[in-house]
Amino acid sequence: MTRKIAAAALLLATLPTLAHAAPQAIQPGYWESTNKLLSPIKQTKVERRCITPAEVDKFMAGPSNRHYKCTYPHKVIAGGKISLKGTCVSKKGRKVAVEGSGAYTQTSFNLTASIATEFLGLDIAGKASTEARRIGDVCPAPETPAQTAETPAAGR
């Protein structure tokens, strides 16, 4: 009986270590993401950005941007899988229902979402996706105006 209790205590003591060893989220660093609107119109945007340790949770929390404020009452991010369902509201009050799922590792992230809204009395449904990958440990230094401005030719 004492051995069973000791074995159970040992197992319980290792659970936090095992949980910590599993990928909990993406790693901070330099990331490239491809965002696609798949329907009703097709559009693709590729961007590179630095994700700091403070921004990891926000990135993992689901689609949101400066045009929409999104809330996800159903949000499960665990074990390398993502599932979410919620609503985004534009600055003008337009509501968009969002439901998505995907997967992640410490160096990759993908999410496909169905979206639904109403425009001029018509129901509009669509699909969007984000595929992202970590491309570096260190983010490049931001460009300064002096780096992007033309320099005058020598001897003129």
Image: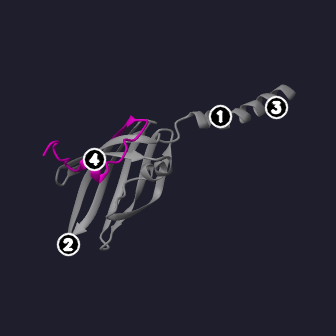
Q: Using the rendered view, name the quadrant where residue 14 is placed.
A: top right
> Which residue in the protein does label 2 denote?
121
Quarter assignment of residue 12: top right
Query: How crowded is the residue under tag 1: few (<14 C-alpha within 10 Å), some, or many (20+)?
Result: few
What residue sits 42% from the left and 46% below the top? 51
Name the residue carrying label 3: 5
In the rendered structure, are the residues bearing label 3 and label 1 in contact, judged by CB atoms less than 8 Å apart? Answer: no
N-term mark: 4 or 3: 3
Foreground residue among 128 and 151: 151
Q: Nearer the viewer, mark 1 or mark 4?
A: 4
Q: Check disc 1 and report the residue beneath it.
A: 17
Q: Amino acid at mark 4?
A: Gln
Could you tell which of marks 2 and 3 lies nearer the N-terminus? 3
Magenta region, residue range: 132-156
Residue 17 lies, in percent from the top left, at: 65, 34
Q: Residues within 10 Å of mark 3 (few under 14, many from 20)?
A: few
Q: CA distance from mark 1 to mark 4?
A: 46 Å
Element class at badge 1: helix
Asked whether the viewer can see residue 107, the reply is yes
Sooner in the amino-acid sequence: mark 1 or mark 2: 1
Residue 149 is covered by the magenta coloring: yes
Q: Disc 4 versus disc 3: distance between alpha carbons?
A: 66 Å
Magenta includes 85?
A: no
Quadrant of the image containing the N terminus: top right
Q: Disc 2 to disc 3, how far (Cα)?
A: 65 Å
Label 4 secondary element: helix
- Secondary structure at numbered mark 3: helix
Classified by dominant secondary structure, the portion drawn in magenta counts as: loop
Residue depth check, mark 3 versus mark 1: number of the one nearer the observer = 1
Give the number of the mark in front: 1 or 2: 1
